[in-house]
Amino acid sequence: MDFISGAGATNVDLLYQGFDRLAGVGEELYCKDFSLQLGGGLPATLINLGRLGIDTRIATELSTDIFSEFAKAKFEENNVTPTNLYSGDKIPLNITSAIILPHDRTFYTYGKGSIEPDDKAKETFYNIASGSKITMMQLGGFLDVYKKLHDEGTILVLDTGWDDEMSFEKYNDYLEIADYYTPNQKEALQITGESTAKDAAYKLKRYFDKVVVKVDKDGCIGIDGDEYFFVKSIDEFHNVDSTGAGDAFLSGFMYGIFHDYSLKESVLFGNITGGKAVTAVGALSGYVTEKELLEYKKRTELIPILLMFSLRICSGIMDSVCSAAEIYFMESAKTVKTNPISCDLFQMQHDGSGESHI
């Protein structure tokens, strides 16, 4: 029960940066910067969890090609133990070339998108996931494995991504066994049919006692039993590239659940890891260590306390100023009463010519 597991396809990104425009047909352009990185999705979430000191295990498809070797090395560097589900002779990963322009980007991808597991692959995944404290769920062929893990007491966290046809009816089998579901605002509105994030969150209580909805760059709303709350995003993080932000949020959120923090604290962890992810290009370039995560949490929680303390100090100063002013005016009133100014001094007297004289 001291690890987190998941099964999903591995993505590798080739990032080409520094173009002003796309090349025309038959034209060659040279980019100013290039990097090879693991892409987003379930593997990125598990890697970020590994960076936070949690033992993580992934069932994925790997082979002997250079991209698979690169992925294996990255998993092992980041405390993720990979187990292979593939036995063919092709490249089983999704390989994406991303052309990054100043205000847009375009993608070219090789691969089949997701894993289509046979019975042997399902058994392999179950063997590595059984006994985990948390297992990540994805839509696809592992539903029977998730059901067995649910019956064994594993905490299941569902992340669906966008689907034009998402609905309670379509996802019911997954929603019924998941302990947590972490949609963004667009996904929550689509799956519930509601028009506001708050209404969508309350409708999700049909399945969950603890509800989380990410409201884009603003932060995250949640419902924990009867408590509705909002956790603001971290102001100091400035968006460079939003790739992998949702995956990174999920890693921080699951870190909190894994260590038995409250739902609100777990959401704060997610806001920190998700916010840090957007400060660099690529799904895994911007991240925090466990020490940094806990320091951010402490600082963020201190802000309202310091603000309240400051307001109390200001209130005390104002009370003192008002008291001093009140004493001053009371003393002034006594002085006036003791030494009245004669109104005759200012009385205007008129003679017959109509001129005024003092």
Image (spheres, rainbow, N blue to C red):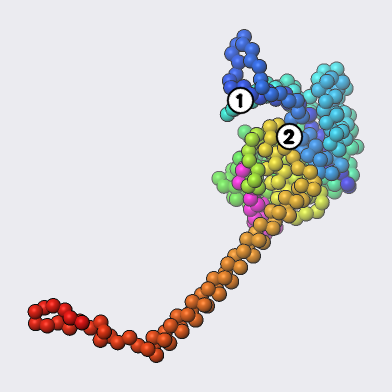
Q: Position of residue 56 (x, y in %)?
A: 85, 40
Q: Residue at x 47, y 80 (%)?
A: 328
Q: Are marks 1 and 2 in contact (CB under 8 Å)?
A: no
Disc assigned to residue 272: none
Instruction: Provide the residue designation for mark 2.
Output: 285
Q: Residue furthest bottom?
A: 338
In the rendered structure, which amino acid carries the disc numbered 2?
Ser
From this viewpoint, is residue 199 visible?
yes
Q: Position of residue 167 (x, y in %)?
A: 65, 39
Q: Position of residue 66 (x, y in %)?
A: 83, 20
The boundaries of the magenta stretch are 216-233
Q: Residue furthest left?
A: 353
Left or right: where 114 falls relative to 167: right
Q: Residue at x 61, y 40 (%)?
A: 186
In the image, residue 237 sits, relative to residue 100, either above or below, namely below
Q: Position of residue 313 (x, y in %)?
A: 61, 68
In the rendered structure, which amino acid carries the disc numbered 1?
Leu
Q: Residue at x 84, y 19 (%)?
A: 65
**Residue 81 located within the stretch drawn in magenta:** no
